[in-house]
Amino acid sequence: MRRRWPFHDRAVPVVSWRIAIVLMAVLAEAWNIKNMLASGERASEHFAYFTVQANLLVIVVMLWMLLVPQARRPGWFDHLRGAATAYIVLTGLVYAVLLAQPDEVWSWSIEFTNAAQHRIIPWLVGLDWLLVPTAGRIRFGRGIWWMLYPIAYLVCSWLRGALVDGWYPYPFLDPGEHGGWAGLAWPTGQVLLAFLVGILLVAGIGRLRYRESAARSSASLVAKPSSTSSSPHSNSSA
């Protein structure tokens, strides 16, 4: 009989790191809001950052998994969890490649909120997805729908910048930084391609981990003898 996979939904290490993720994400965002209020930054700008939105989604997903048993979650929850994982992991990658200063990429002498939201939380959420199998099989066809949110975010950011207040959350979305709208094709295309590849990779890992967990459970059932067949003489006294 094979042992049960140790990193299941109610395993102590899994619950512990999910609590740690929630606490760190809440603390980091609370610190951000404190800084926002102190600096006079507009809330409409702060909450328009993809980093902030992805971290808030992580809080919701982690709390959901901590408070609601797996059997009581809706069938689409695995896709929500997968999408949140892809968004937060890609947030960290995009920050490191496109937004961070060269001396920040490998440095830990940065403020807590930056380290938490762009490094520690993405790593922990990615580890959670890698180690804790999904309840159902992830379908690539449905996984592609995870791209809807990044695309909608892109469109809304451009509409806001062009029609509302001229503010863009990131330099790679600002046509003024790239000589006009045509100049955005390359940086924006890079980000969208990274999201597509990352989403497919996360969906593929989820699909593979489900198959492994299912195969492990089947093997355990085959290896475990039934109560009626464990003894050839179990019915001899009848």
Image (cartoon, rainbow, N blue to C red):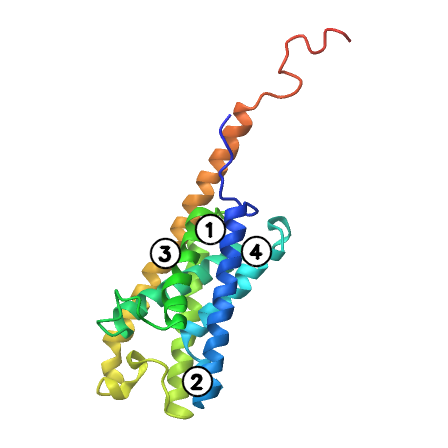
Counting residues from the N terminus, which is met first, the one under dot 2 or under dot 3?
Answer: 2
x 28%, y 73%: residue: 100
SS label for mark 1:
loop
Q: Nearer the viewer, residue 154 or 3?
A: 3
Q: Which residue is mark 2?
A: 45
**Res 65 label:** 4
What is the crowding at mark 1: few (fewer than 14 residues within 10 Å), some, or many (at least 20)?
Answer: many
- Estimate the spatial distance between the alpha carbons at disc 4 and disc 2, rounded to whole Å: 30 Å
Counting residues from the N terminus, which is met first, the one under dot 4 or under dot 2?
Answer: 2
Q: Are marks 3 and 4 in contact (CB under 8 Å)?
A: no
Could you say which quadrant of the image residue 123 lies in?
bottom left
Say left or right for 227 vs 151: right
What is the crowding at mark 3: few (fewer than 14 residues within 10 Å), some, or many (at least 20)?
Answer: some
x 48%, y 39%: residue: 213
Residue 41 visible in the picture: no
Q: Are marks 4 and 2 in contact (CB under 8 Å)?
A: no
* Closer mark to the observer between disc 2 and disc 3: 2
Q: Which residue is mark 1?
A: 138
Q: Which residue is mark 3?
A: 200
Could you say which quadrant of the image residue 199 lies in?
bottom left
Instruction: Specify the amino acid type for callout 2.
Output: Glu
- Estimate the spatial distance between the alpha carbons at disc 2 and disc 3, rounded to whole Å: 30 Å
- Estimate the spatial distance between the alpha carbons at disc 3 and disc 1, rounded to whole Å: 11 Å
- Circle count: 4
Compared to residue 184, the image places residue 3 above or below, namely above
